[in-house]
Image: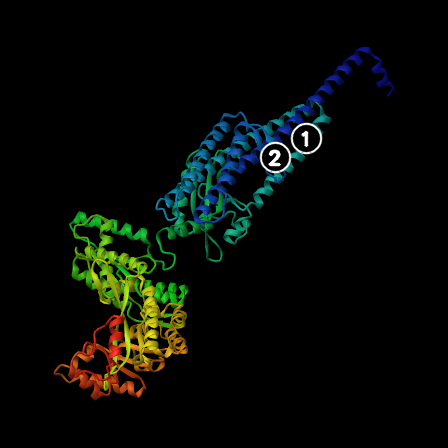
Amino acid sequence: MRNLSRAFEDPRINRQFRWIVIVYLMIVAVLVTYNARAVARQRGAALIVNVAGRQRALAERYVKDVVLELRGDVADPRQDAIELRTNDNALLHGGDVLPVQGADGTVTIPAAGTNPAVVDKLAEEHRLIEDLIATGDRALELLPGDPRLPDAVLELRTVGAQVTSVSNDTVGQMTADSERAMTRLVASVIVLGVLGAVVAVAMGLSLRRTERKRSARFRSLVDNASDLITVVDPLGTIRYQSPSVVRLVGVEADRIVGTSYLELIDPDDRTHLSAVLLDVSRTTDAVATAEYRLRHADGSSRYVESIISGRMSDPSVRGLVLNSRDVSDRKTLEEELAHQAFHDSLTGLSNRAVFRDRVDHGLAVAARHGQSITVLLLDLDGFKTINDSLGHDAGDELLVGVAGRLLGASRSSDTVARLGGDEFGIVLEDASDPERAVSAAARFLAGLEPPFEVRGRQVSIRASIGIAISDGLQDTDDLIRNADTAMYAAKAGGKGRSELFVPDMHERAMAQFEMQADLERAITDEEFVVHYQPIVALESGKVLGVEALVRWRHPDRGVLGPIEFIRVAEETGLIVPIGRWVLEQACRQTAAWRATCPAAADMWVSVNLSTRQLVEPDLVRHVRDALAASGLEPAALTLELTEGSLMQDVAETIVTLRALKALGVRLAIDDFGTGSSSLGYLRHFPIDLLKIDKSFVDELAGTGVEGPALVHAIIDMARTLELDTVAEGIEYDEQLEELRTAGCGSGQGYLFARPLEAPAIETMLERAVTTAPR
């Protein structure tokens, strides 16, 4: 100590030491300042790297939200676009961004750097982001079902993948810059540490702690990331594998290190991925994207998308880095969107867009080879009745069953599509002559003949088919319109059949459309009138009742009978308001006759119910209201139904008939003997009266023996079931005598009177005719 004190007493030594101390303190100050600034720069660089890394997540979220919104789900791609642009501009020019770690508020970052490589990458990334958002905006303008939608989604995902690739390169370049800066910092500390051991040791320890934290943070991010990070050599041998691999392949990471990565790949995808790995390894710093399937230990497969970066020149890697992510959900969504774009969601058949495309294609091929194609349009008969009576779920089940039958009756070269509702389209590209086309239609109709099992019920359904052959026609719309016209002609011809298009069908179709418009006007303008045909006792000739028959006083065509408009009214549903009006008029008129004319005191009226009316849910209420409004006794009203309408849905029909019987009205089967009802069903229907069809009565005037035998059998059966009988269409005395002999109680026909307007019926009643004409 004394020697040291003496040394300080030496002015020269003191001056030297003073300079040494000053220099030492300056070194320490520079070292501390330099270290503080370097550490701050490293922290800022790490923040910028994280912000740059966020670009990939924002771009992927934007792509996903665009696809979700196109599918109809709740998403906000426009907000994603705002965040993506904000992040992008901050990296290029500096600015405020949301903190990566999720803290409240924003943080301010400087521009990502002055390194030309980083700036170029950011500029390229900026251009791709603007392209991505523009592509998304164009996709969002498309409507669901637009045929351009799959291409728009594919373009969106392609640009998104480019953004991801460039973003990864940018982050890699920035990370490399950061690592080089760190290396320079360590080197400076070592050099400066030689001059200032104390500062060097302190700063060295500080840097080591900082580096350990930084490395631990990066290691934590890698180990806990959902994406797979894999390092392989050019031959595919795994050198490093992140722990997240266990989720996708069911094997721990340490168990697959040293094995071939290709062994984890689905065999069908190995050749493709092997070629990609080889291409990347041959080019310095090359980057490629590959999509393939990873096999799980349980035998299942998952789709992954890998960004493969060549790092052969990097001494710390000497291989290829695969950054892989699970895209199975995205693939499923893409497949669902593709399926929905081209298939009917209920039946799984091709949809209208595919049907039109196949017609377009068929016409083009036919034109090149001088051939023709055939289009069939099939529409179910009476489907609305089934849908209304059994419910829409049952209707959907029936449509699925019909689709299966149509596919079963088709050939591999045919296209079967559901065009909407209960309408189906079929394209036959190799059936160019009428005979083969009609044969194909018959095959489809035969496939629908067996009853369908729907909700525990046996349901029968028929169809009408329109056939159109191109025969040189090149316009898709014209060919489909021709088939549609033929289909309506098939319905008009009795349904359950097919019809081949001929040119004059257009005129008939236009006439039907005009008829429908006239009917709608006639209902509004009250152009209908009710005529009444007497029903008389065959023994005495007394008028027992009347049948109400609707007529149309057309302003241009005069009085029209039912045969000229009832079919169109049935098909369009206008029969319901027309039938309701006839019921109300008939009840009101009959009640008036019974009250004012002694000969009509016990007279009843018979009103026809159509099939459409029978399935109306408000039918019973309408009948009750008509009786109440007119004051007519329920027993004086007879409702006539055809055998066909009774057999539409037997269980529901019985419920409706019993509800009508509960009102006190009588029920009759019209045109008996021409339908398909069996005796077993007949016993369950609460029927009071059978009307023998005119076709059987006509045979009574002939020379054969079959007609009288059938009439006798019907009357005997009715007597056994305790039912009254009315013979229709009696025109000759010999028919009357035969019916009397058979024991038929009453009848109607021109022999007694034609359908008359109400005043003429009143005149007949006033004469009180009591004997049948002879």
Give the camera-side residue of 660 and 323: 660
Mark on residue 106? 2
Q: CA distance from mark 2 to mark 1?
A: 33 Å
Res. 322 visible in picture: no
Bin the neighbour count of mark 2 within 10 Å (Cα to Cα): few under 14, some 14-19, many 20 and up: few
Give the side of residue 504 with respect to residue 338, left or right: left
Give coordinates of residue 121: x percent, y percent: 48, 30
Is residue 435 positioned above or below 253 on the image?
below
Counting other residues with Cα less than 10 Å from the Cα at mark 1, is it few (<14), some (14-19), or many (20 or more)? Answer: some
- For label 1, the residue is 204
Describe the colour scheme in one phrase: rainbow
Find residue 298 and name its label. none
Residue that protrudes farthest toward the left in the picture: 703
Q: Identify which residue is drawn at 47% across, 45% down.
A: 64
Q: Amino acid at mark 2?
A: Thr
Residue that appears at 83% across and 15% down? 8
* Residue in front for this viewpoint, 98 or 773: 773
